[in-house]
Amino acid sequence: MLIPIADYAAGVEVANDLVGTSPDVRGSEAIPGELADLLAAHDFRAPDAADAEKIRFLRGEVRAVMESATEDEAVERASLLAGHAGLAPVLRRDPSGRWQWYVPTARDASLVGELAAVIGVALLGLVRALGHGRFRACAAPGCGGVFADASRAGRRRYCTPELCGNRLNVANHRARRRAVAR
């Protein structure tokens, strides 16, 4: 696998989706089928039974990067993730013929190793391009989620917009209806 260094946003979404499977966000642990669907959506192979527990541990490591107190701590933790299966960067031509930096993974890398390397490289790219301030806690009341904001505007507020953002919008709508009914 070749991990593009310049295209960190795709890897950040993998990280956000993985951290979003946490019981702190969902209220319960993701079931293995949901984890397989998440990985398939990001073009990773399906996890086997042994991978599931390792991926849950990896989720905690990724969350620790996002919750890091300083930029230096985030870089140190993300570098450890990138080193799980990542090798020295290489310069290769992309499909359009332009030279791009890539981080290859070891030929015998496990699913969890490749996942960690993709996320680690992406989070390092995010810190370099956009800064440590893009790691945030979810703004939804009662949610314990965290996320990395790779959006251009940098205005993302929720760890899982379709879940946390929707919950808050529904609660605000109901509060407005109650206020009008009085």
Image: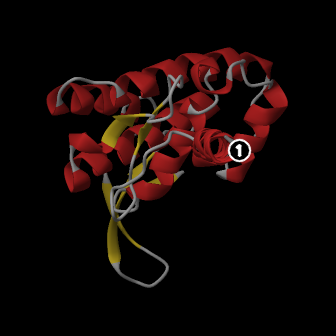
- Percent across and percent down for residue 10 are 50, 56
- Percent across and percent down for residue 78 are 33, 32
Side of 59 relative to 8 (left or right): right
Q: Could you say whether the residue bearing mark 1 is in a helix, strand or loop? A: helix
Q: Which residue is mark 1?
A: 181
Which quadrant of the view contains residue 19?
A: top right
- Percent across and percent down for residue 2 are 48, 55
Looking at the image, which is closer to me, 18 or 124?
A: 18
- What's the residue at 52%, 40% (across, down)? 16
- Color scheme of the displayed model: secondary structure
Q: Is residue 78 above or below residue 4?
A: above
Q: Is residue 66 above or below residue 10?
A: above
Looking at the image, which is closer to me, 74 or 158?
A: 158
- What's the residue at 73%, 33% (across, down)? 35
Mark 1 belongs to which amino acid?
A: Ala
Which quadrant of the view contains residue 47?
A: top right
- What's the residue at 53%, 25% (across, down)? 143
**Residue 45 appears in the figure:** no
Side of 130 relative to 1 (left or right): left
